[in-house]
Image: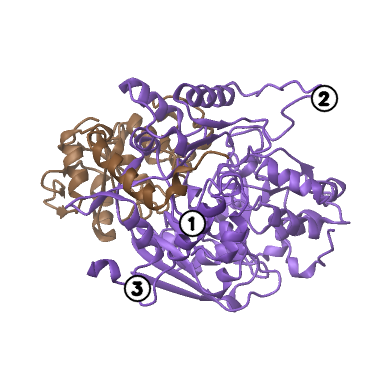
Chain colours: A brown, B purple
Amino acid sequence: MRPIGTIEGKAYPLGRANIDTDIIIPAHWLKTITRDGLGKGAFETIRAEPGNVFDDARFAGAPILIAGENYGCGSSREHAAWAMADLGIRAVIAPSFSDIHSGNAFKNGILTVVLPQEQVDRLLEVAQELPITIDLEAQTVTTPYQDRFHFEIDPFRKDCLLKGLDEIGITMELDGAIAAYEAKAHGETPWVEGAAAA
Amino acid sequence: MATESAPRTLYEKIWDAHIVQQRDDGTALLYIDRHLVHEVTSPQAFDGLRAHGRKVRRPDLTLAVADHNIQTTARVDAAGHRLPVEDPESAQQLAALVKNTRDFGVEYIEDLAAEQGIVHVVGPEQAFTLPGTTVVCGDSHTASHGALGALAFGIGTSEVEHVLATQTLLLKRSKSLEVRVDGPLGPGVTPKDVALAIVAALGAGGGAGYVAEYTGSVFREMSIEGRLTVCNMSIEAGARAGLVAPDDATFAYLQGKPRAPKDAAWDEAVAYWRSLATDAGATYDKVVTIDAATIVPLVTWGTSPDDSVPITGTVPDPASFADPSRRAAAEKSLAYMGLTPGQRMQDVTVDRIFIGSCTNSRIEDLRAAAAIARGRHIASNVKQALVVPGSGLVKRQAEAEGLDRIFIEAGFEWREPGCSMCLAMNPDKVPAGERCASTSNRNFVGRQGPGARTHLLSPAMAAAAAVTGKLTDVRDISVREIA
């Protein structure tokens, strides 16, 4: 995954709450067997609305999306993160995220930034005209108006995003610990090993 | 040992028993006992393994079945020849699952097998899901399996790949939430109504960051099928997992199922499963209590699963929402749904009926719907009424009980198992502008097809809507003997 340091640029000021992953990428786009090319289906139902932020020339190619609470709720489809990445989105700022979607975004090098609603509202206002800067190392979101908002991030996620680490590769190095767990735990609960039909 | 003897919740006990490695940053590498795989969220994961030359670490703890894309019309012709999947993209995705499971040595329940069905119906029915295990699947409704006392949650495709390669996930422990519902349920109130009431009480994002445990007399007395319905919709309140402590009903449900432990192993397993219940004195991070007597048959009016009202109620006025973003969302929802504030829910006519999905496609759901449908006929304004059993085994059981005849005589279509009209990935879709009374779990914009309007409700209420042609209070319709 591509390392993230600083993300600077225009932001789509979407603002709405409860943006579910069916909105981010409708189901008929889910029949693909690759991760590529989903940007053209991203936010399809919103893009059917006249004057939507995604087709507004002011925000064309924006690397940041600003949304309302509970962003990415609903289906676990990682296609939502792939569609956002394909659209060029590298960070989403919202008051809260669904657990599954924020994990999916992270695995695809998309930073999810949680800020209080009033700070999100301020960024929505600034984003109408000006770019926004997210500094992952410093954990700040700043604007040309000298706004400076601090955000929290899980230290492991921060490290992976900064370095662009392959999580599976890291875990595979722990194979000995995994095998030791299996030997011990499944000695105590042997039926767990019997998943196959008798 | 002091920490081990401290009272723990069901969630904490399962979590602790699966830690491979605890890290200083608060995350843990957690062992995954059961991995269910379906065709939509797995192709890119298998490709990822190929790209890195990796194997599936525990194919024997992995089970695959196709459900999302698969057609629910006949799969073989009268001569027994396989009928093609018409949509080439669906066919490609289904074929990829067959190839991937073969290449990586994973068991695949073949599409013509009686055991085929919706992944969240198949897991419990096969006793692939067991109490105290960790269960994952690339599908948010994996929360369902918590009904058996398993810690079960949906994951994304990168996590599917991680589990395939390592049989583990790196996770941060969630906060614990107790949802307690005590007291007798009123007439016509089903597990689906309990689920909708919980989602409304918590809000669509209220459970985010939590694992819910459902406690209280309502769940103790609820069937396993009913618990599956409630746990299924945990994610509609944002909770990644929902749990019910395993009890005698759980053990009775599992005993003798194909993959359940047998003989001495069964007794040993039951003794262990009994020890999992939340200890007296254990505390939750948050507690929500609901008085069962306040729950009535519910129906959704909007485009979020927490947008429900009593069937006897009216469409809310967006102006009644104090929060400006809720108000704006309600205005958008009503425009999409074609409803006006103050309109009686029971005056809303419906075009289609869908009885099925991982929420409500089990045998009890079909019995409840058949008890309303028996001796009646779908209304003339209803263009289509589908009954889609959750698995081939549910279908077989229903047919043995004569439920298929009841539905067919009432004008319903009796289909093959699959996700069907829940999510618009297969030929079963609701056309734009049409209104569907649906037993599924999501009323999102476009969920059942672009422009489709969804009203979530219980199987009995869906059958009632089918026979009257409009949203109907099931308590006004007499229930009939089905056998």
Amino acid identity at mark 3: Thr
Q: Which mark is residue A198?
A: none
Q: Taking B338 as reference, is B193 above or below it? A: below
What residue is rendered at 48% in x and 24% in y? B100
**Where residue A128 sits in the image (x, y, percent)?**
27, 45
Q: Which chain letter matches label 1? A: B
Between A24 and B260, which is closer to the camera in this rendering? B260
Q: Which mark is residue B283?
A: 3
Q: How many marks?
A: 3
Q: Which chain letter matches label 3? A: B
Q: Do tags 2 and 1 sit on the same chain? A: yes
Amino acid identity at mark 1: Ala
Name the residue tied to disc 1. Answer: B269
Measure the alpha-carbon separation of dots 3 and 1.
26 Å
Name the residue tied to disc 2. Answer: B78
Tell me the crowding category of disc 3: few under 14, some 14 to 19, or many 20 or more residues within 10 angstroms, Cα based: some
Left or right, A162 with respect to B81, comes to: left
Task: For the residues labelled 2 and 3, say whether their Cβ atoms are less than 8 Å apart.
Answer: no
Q: Quadrant of residue B295?
A: bottom right
Q: Which chain letter matches label 2? A: B
Dot in front, 2 or 1: 1
